Amino acid sequence: MSDKSVLMFPRPKSDTPGLAKPGSMLLTQGALMALGAAALIVLPFLVTGYVLYIANLLLVFIVLCLGLHLVIGETGQFALAHAAFYGIGIYTSGLAGNALGWPFPLSMLLAGLVAGAVGLVIGAVALRMRDIYLALATFAFGEAMQWVFLNWDQVTGGPNGLRISPARLGSLEVLTDRQAYPVVVIVALLMIVLTVVISRSRLGRSFRAVRESDVAAMAMGIPVRRAKITAFGLSAFYAGIAGSMFATFSTYIHPDSLGFQTTILVLTMVVVGGLGSITGAVGGAIVFGLISEFLRQTPSYQEIIYGLILIVFMMYAPRGLFAFVRDLMGRMARG
Amino acid sequence: MAENLLEVTDLTVRFGGLTAVNKFDIAVQRGTIHALIGPNGAGKSTTFNCISRFYEPTAGRILLNGVDVTRSPASAMAGLGVARTFQNLELFGELTVFENVMIGAHVHAGRSWADALSARPSGVVDHIEHLLQRTGLTAYRNTVARNLDFGHQKLLELARALAIRPRLLLLDEPAAGLRNREIAALDALLTDLCRREGITILLVEHVMQLVMAISDRVTVLNFGTKIAEGTPDEVRNDPSVIEAYLGQEMVHA
C-alpha cells in the first residue's frame, strides 16, 4: 500500500502546478466531479427551502470568488472593489427586470456586461498604479460606489433598498429559492467552465506571466497593461453575473451589504481556499460561506472568528486549505 | 532586406545630469554574433535595454531590418522577432519549465481560436519540446522554475527566448555565474544557433573566454562612448581597449 501511495503523491513540499497527474488521481478527480454533480442534482429533492437558499448563496459566492481569483490569484493585481461590481450586477439585473420587464437570461447578461464595462474603465485608470496604491484606489472606488447605491434614490431606492421583482422568462416566474436553484446552478457551472477555459488558454498564461514578472512578460510580447485591464474587466464581469444570480432568488437588496466587508469576505474565501487555484476559490467559497452562515446569529463573534481563521491560515497554511489537505494526505500516505 | 539586421545611430541616454550613453553607433550584421563589452558602468546594459525597448533613449535611432523601432513599445519587440534575456534572471518563478517556455511562444500561440484556447497549442508544442531537448531541460519540464539550479535557470531563460523564434537574440551576460563546463556548452549552443539557424546574436558579456571564442565582431564601450570595434583579435590588441581595462585582466581564449 505504502509503496503505491508514494507514487500517487510524488510531491513532498514543493508544489508543481501543471504536473501531469498519475492516472489514478485523474480517476479520483473524475469520480469526485461525478459525485459533486449528482449531489447538485438530488439536493433540491432532499432539503428544505432554507438549505436551498444557502446553496444558492454559496453558488453566488463561488462565482464572486472565481472573479477575484482571476484578478488576484492569476494576474496578481490586488483589486479591492469586488462588492461594487457585485452591486452593479444586482441593481442592473434587478432594474432590467423591474422597469423593463426583461427575461432573466438577458438581464443577467446585461448585468455582467455593465459591471464588466465599468470594470474596464476603472481598471484602465487604477491599473496605472500597483500594489498598495492599486489596492487603495480600488478600495476608494468601492466606497464611492456604495455611496452611489445609498444616495441615487430614484434608481437604487437609496437607504430604503430596492425591491426586486421575481425573475421572469415568458410566462415562467421564479418565486422561490427552489425554483431559482436550477438557474443558479447552471450559471455557476458555466462560470466554472469559463474559468477553467480562460486559465488554460493563452490569455490565462499571459495573466500568470504578468503575475510572475511583468518585465519578462513584456519581453515575451505580452502587452502587460492590457492583460491587467482585461483581468480586471473579467473579474468585474464575474461579479456582475454573481449579482444577477443573487437577484434571481432574492427579493430585496440594501446598500449595506455591498460594502468593503463583502469584498473582504470574498478575499478571505479566496485566500483561505488557496490563492491561485480554481479548486481553492470554489472550495474556499463553500467552506467559508458555510462558516459565515453558521455565525450569522452571532454577528459580534463573526468578525473575530473571520480574523482568527485568516491569521491561522496565513501562519500555518499560506497556500490555502486545499493545498494543506493535499500535503497532509500525502504525508499520511507516506507514513 | 537591409544588410544590417540592427542599426543603432547616435544613441544617447541621459539620466538626469548623467550621460550613460553618448552618441553611440552599432551595426549588427545579419547572421553574426556581435559582442558588446566594456568595464562596469560603461553603458552596455543601458544600450542593451534601449535596443530591447525597455529604456527610452534621449536621442538617436534604432533600425531593425531597416524599420525604425526607436519608439516601439517593449511588448511589440517579440512580434518583430527580437528576443532577450535578463542580466538578473527574470523567470516566471512559480510556473513550470514547460509553462515558462510556452509563454515564450505567446506571439505564436494565437494563430487560431483552437490554439488560443488550448493548454498545448498544436502550432507551437513541437517546437517547445525541441527547445527543451536542445537545452537539456526535458527532464525538468514539470519542475517549478524557481526550484531549478542557477545553470538550468539560465538555460531556461534562453529556451524561453528561443520560443519567440527570434531573428535577433539579445543576451545580457549569458555566461555570468556559470561554471566552466557550462560556459563551454553555452559556447557550442550559441555558435550552433547562429551558424546553423541563422539567428543573429548581440550579447553583452564580461566573460572574455566566451566573447573571444564565439564573436564575429566586438564593440567596446567605455564611459558611454565607443572606443573600439573589430574582430576579437583586433580588439584584444587595441591599445585604448587595454587601457580601458587597465588593472583588469583580460582572459584570453
Image (cartoon, helix red, strand yellow):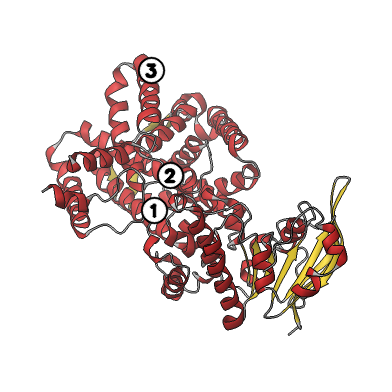
Q: At label 3, which amino acid type do we have?
A: Ile
Q: Residue at x 31, y 32 (%)?
A: A289
**Residue B90 or residue A153, whichever sits in front:** B90
Q: Is residue B28 left or right of residue B109?
A: right
Earlier sequence position, callout 2 versus callout 3: 2
**Residue B30 or residue B38, whichever sits in front:** B38
Q: Is residue A122 left or right of residue B42?
A: left
Q: What distance separates the C-alpha of mark 2 from that of mark 3?
A: 24 Å
Q: Which mark is residue A69?
A: 2
- Residue A214 coordinates in the image, percent (x, y): 59, 51
User: Circle 2: is it few (<14), some (14-19), or many (20+) Cα within 10 Å?
Assistant: many
Q: Which residue is drawn at 62% across and 45% down?
A: A127
Q: Are marks 2 and 3 on the same chain?
A: yes
Q: Which residue is drawn at 41% across and 49% down?
A: A108
User: Circle 3: is it few (<14), some (14-19), or many (20+) Cα within 10 Å?
Assistant: few
User: Circle 1: is it few (<14), some (14-19), or many (20+) Cα within 10 Å?
Assistant: many
SS at mark 2?
helix
Is the residue under label 3 in contact with that under label 2 (CB below 8 Å)? no
Q: Mark 3 points at which residue?
A: A304
Q: At label 1, which amino acid type do we have?
A: Thr
Earlier sequence position, callout 2 versus callout 1: 2
Q: What is the chain letter for disc 3? A: A
Q: Residue A195 carries which label?
A: 1
Q: Do labels 1 and 3 share a chain?
A: yes
Is the residue under label 1 in contact with that under label 2 (CB below 8 Å)? yes
